[in-house]
Image (cartoon, rainbow, N blue to C red):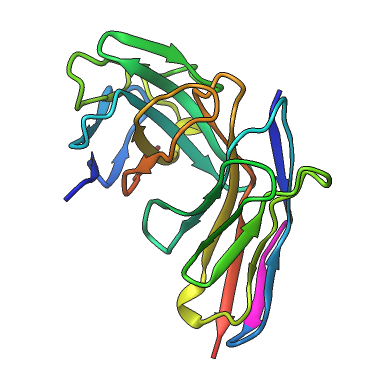
Amino acid sequence: EAQVTQNPRYLITVTGKKLTVTCSQNMNHEYMSWYRQDPGLGLRQIYYSMNVEATDKGDVPEGYKVSRKEKRNFPLILESPSPNQTSLYFCASSYFTGGKGNEQFFGPGTRLTVL
Amino acid sequence: GNSVTQMEGPVTLSEEAFLTINCTYTATGYPSLFWYVQYPGEGLQLLLKATKADDKGSNKGFEATYRKETTSFHLEKGSVQVSDSAVYFCALFNQAGTALIFGKGTTLSVSS
């Protein structure tokens, strides 16, 4: 089954404790992306990757890191989480053809709470 | 840059009522337009899309027409069901095609 998986689905942590949210896709997509969803703000892009070893900042990258060492995986790293990073996080992937863009497939989400 | 505005919710309807969720966009050129749906506790799923002016996207009884003259992509359904209760997002890509830009979402609640 074609899918994007994220782990963990729920996480409660404390300020400053490094954490990683994993994302994996099995559709051989070049493009992967992380979004955060906040009430009243909709979804905003954190980082994206056009292919292995090619990552770039989205609209809200502060406090986050990513890596793309393999095509299927795109982990999101919070090296020193703060309460303002409490949010619902989504990973997405797609083929990339530029310009108009293609349908993005989303993971189930990770609900993060930073105390 | 490209942007999208959709009507604020929540929208509360009775089963079998007609649904319209308004969406307008600002964009350079003619980007593809999308409606995504988020059911409670789940990720986003593509509901429908349209790739050029006057295209009509449709799925599961929902429809939306890409209107270049009014820069709109309103979502409609003739008869909603309780199972349609969800959050609906209108979206388009940024100019580079590297990020989806979403509206703030409209929560639909349908009661029997």
Residue B65: image quadrant is bottom right
Number of on-image labels: 0
Seen at 49% across and 30% down, the residue is A101
Query: In this rendering, is residue A107 above or below A52?
Result: below
Query: In this rendering, is residue A108 above or below B12?
Result: above
Q: Residue furthest toward the top? A: A53
Seen at 66% across and 76% down, the residue is B12
Residue B26: image quadrant is top right
Q: Does the magenta stretch include residue A107?
A: no
Q: Position of residue B20 (x, y in %)?
A: 70, 68
Seen at 27% across and 29% down, the residue is A29
Does any portion of residue B82 appear in the rendered image? Answer: yes
Q: Position of residue B95 (x, y in %)?
A: 61, 22
Q: Report whether A96 appears left or right of B95.
A: left
Q: Where is residue A90 in the image (x, y as percent from the top left)?
A: 38, 39
Question: Who is closer to the viewer here, A52 or A82?
Answer: A52
Q: Where is residue B16 in the image (x, y as percent from the top left)?
A: 60, 87
- The residue stretch that appears in magenta: B7-13
Does any portion of residue A112 appear in the rendered image? Answer: no
Question: Who is closer to the viewer here, A25 or B43?
Answer: A25
Question: Who is closer to the viewer here, A94 or A67?
Answer: A94
Q: Residue furthest toward the right? A: B69
Q: Report whether A55 appears left or right of B64.
A: left
Question: Who is closer to the viewer here, A31 or B38?
Answer: A31
Query: In this rendering, is residue A3 above or below B56?
Result: above
Seen at 72% across and 57% down, the residue is B8
Q: Report whether A14 appears left or right of B49.
A: left
- In what quadrant of the picture does the C terminus of chain A appear? top left
